[in-house]
Image (cartoon, rainbow, N blue to C red):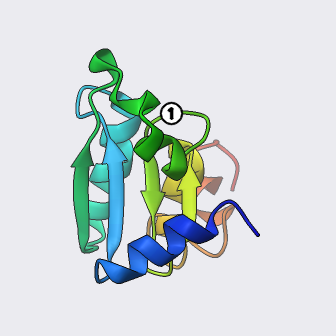
Amino acid sequence: MDAARPLDRAYRETGGGMKIYGDIGSGNCQKVKATADYLGLRYDWIAVDILKGESRTPEFLRVNPAGQVPAVVFDDGRALAQSNAIVKYLARGSSLLPEDAFEPWRGISGFI
């Protein structure tokens, strides 16, 4: 059985919705929160105080076995960690992550 299965089942039983686990004092966590806010995504913020060891509890380690924040659990039970990966996933298809990754930078680089 996949180790993520118990988390998936428990998560679905609570009614779903995206949950962002993070420490508000962390810039990486704030990046994820700011992206979700900018995009108008619905989520529950789950505060994890890393200075109190809350990222090392058995409950949190089921979300992210590496014991790091930020981490996101989506409404289908899948989890994702690492702020850049989360931001890129959330931003797909939005103005934050355009289809043509070259075009927005063309004028800035000094080339036409």
Identify the residue under disc 1: 68
Q: Nearer the viewer, residue 2 or 29?
A: 2
Q: Nearer the viewer, residue 63 or 3?
A: 3
Q: Nearer the viewer, residue 64 or 33?
A: 64
User: From the viewer's perspective, is 38 left or right of 110?
Assistant: left
Image x and y of residue 19, in percent: 33, 62
Image x and y of residue 18, in percent: 35, 70
User: From the viewer's perspective, is 39 left or right of 72?
Assistant: left
The answer to whether 5 is drawn above or below residue 79 in the figure is: below
Residue drawn at (41%, 81%), measured in percent from left and top?
12
Q: Secondary structure at mark 1?
A: loop
The amino acid type found where label 1 is placed reads: Gln
Residue 69, image quadrant: top left
The answer to whether 14 is drawn above or below residue 96 in the figure is: below
Residue drawn at (55%, 67%), measured in percent from left and top?
6
* Quadrant in which the C terminus appears: bottom right
The total number of labels drawn is: 1
User: From the viewer's perspective, is 47 left or right of 88?
Assistant: left
Furthest toward the top, the residue is 51
Residue drawn at (30%, 40%), measured in percent from left and top?
30
Residue 54 visible in the shown view = yes
Residue drawn at (35%, 21%), measured in percent from left and top?
53
Residue 73, image quadrant: bottom left
Image x and y of residue 21, in percent: 35, 48
Image x and y of residue 32, in percent: 38, 50
Q: Nearer the viewer, residue 20 or 65?
A: 65
Furthest toward the right, the residue is 1
